[in-house]
């Protein structure tokens, strides 16, 4: 398999190897199997935390029993299978399986990898017994968060760099919390006695909505003026996970 998951990033499926977990015999079914990929950065620029996406259908052409929901992704600094077999250290790569069309079946495996200029790294996708894979996988640190609370007057969500909220009332606009220090602070911002519009070492609510559309909202151009679409009976997320009546 040769494909480009992103511009200038080359992925090659090298081989399928069966591994026997401890306590099994040569006649027993292996608890864990692995697929080996070579990921190459052919450019002169380093690629930090590069997003790589591999289609489940491509992996199943080689391994029909591949289970995207029960897999763990690791990588060595080896460039070939021979070097990878002698590698003493491997590192787990943050990964996830995605169901893109909501049919209850995984369509892709996505992971992130660091690549130097012109570097090739061998990536291992191990899959098999769910209990075994669960023991092998690490807990990834949270990078995003969401919180629904009346203190936010709607839904708040954040990355480590900034936080936002959408007002579930007639303001119908997106507000911004600016952060001075990277981190996830919505739980603190939403606590009963915390004043989030006052300056602090962590940051604060830095945007005054007023009559504006904020950082994003539905509006209409009326007589040359942008008007909010605010006279509504309710508001909800795209999938109906949160709802609130307007004030």
Image: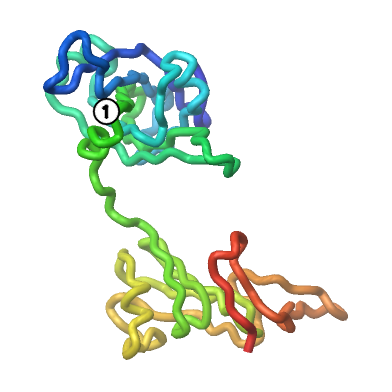
Q: Is residue 67 left or right of residue 107?
A: left
Residue 188, image quadrant: bottom left
**Quadrant in which the C terminus appears:** bottom right
x 34%, y 13%: residue: 16
Image height of 14 relative to 42, above or below: above
| Foreground of the two, 155 or 207 | 155
The residue indicated by pointer 1 is 75
Instruction: Residue 17 in the image: state x and y as whole percent.
Output: 29, 13
Instruction: Residue 175 in the image: state x and y as whole percent.
Output: 53, 76
**Secondary structure beneath disc 1?**
strand
Image height of 184 relative to 64, above or below: below
Residue 12, image quadrant: top left
x 66%, y 85%: residue: 170
x 30%, y 26%: residue: 126
Image height of 196 relative to 137, above or below: below
Taking the view exactly as shown, the residue that stands out farthest to the right is: 223
According to the image, what is the colour scheme of the structure? rainbow
Q: Is residue 136 left or right of residue 215?
A: left
Instruction: Residue 154 in the image: state x and y as whole percent.
Output: 52, 78
Instruction: Residue 50 in the image: state x and y as whole percent.
Output: 40, 37
Number of numbered discs: 1
x 70%, y 81%: residue: 233
| Foreground of the two, 19 or 4 | 19
Q: Residues within 10 Å of mark 1 (few under 14, many from 20)?
A: many
| Foreground of the two, 202 or 244 | 244
Image height of 17 relative to 152, above or below: above
| Foreground of the two, 8 or 217 | 217
């Amino acid at each position: 398999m040769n494909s480009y998951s992103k511009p200038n990033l080359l992925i090659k499926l090298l081989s399928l190897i069966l591994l026997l977990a401890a306590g099994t015999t040569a006649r027993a079914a292996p608890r864990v199997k692995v697929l080996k990929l070579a990921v190459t950065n052919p450019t002169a620029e380093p690629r930090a935390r590069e997003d790589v996406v591999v289609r489940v259908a491509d992996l199943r052409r080689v391994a029909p029993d591949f289970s995207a929901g029960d897999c763990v992704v690791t990588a060595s600094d080896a460039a070939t299978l021979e070097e990878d077999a002698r590698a003493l250290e491997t590192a787990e790569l943050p990964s996830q399986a995605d169901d893109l069309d909501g049919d209850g079946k995984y369509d892709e495996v996505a992971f992130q990898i660091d690549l130097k200029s012109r570097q090739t790294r061998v990536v291992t996708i191990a899959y098999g017994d769910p209990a075994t894979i669960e023991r092998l996988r690490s807990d990834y640190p949270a990078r995003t968060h969401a919180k629904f609370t009346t203190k936010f007057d709607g839904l708040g969500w954040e990355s480590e760099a900034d936080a936002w909220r959408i007002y579930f009332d007639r303001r119908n606009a997106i507000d911004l919390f600016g952060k001075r220090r990277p981190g996830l602070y919505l739980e603190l911002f939403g606590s009963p006695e915390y004043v989030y519009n006052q300056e602090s070492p962590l940051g604060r609510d830095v945007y005054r909505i007023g009559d504006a559309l904020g950082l994003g909202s539905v509006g209409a151009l009326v007589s040359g003026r942008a008007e909010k679409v605010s006279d509504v009976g309710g508001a909800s997320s795209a999938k109906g996970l949160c709802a609130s009546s307007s004030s």
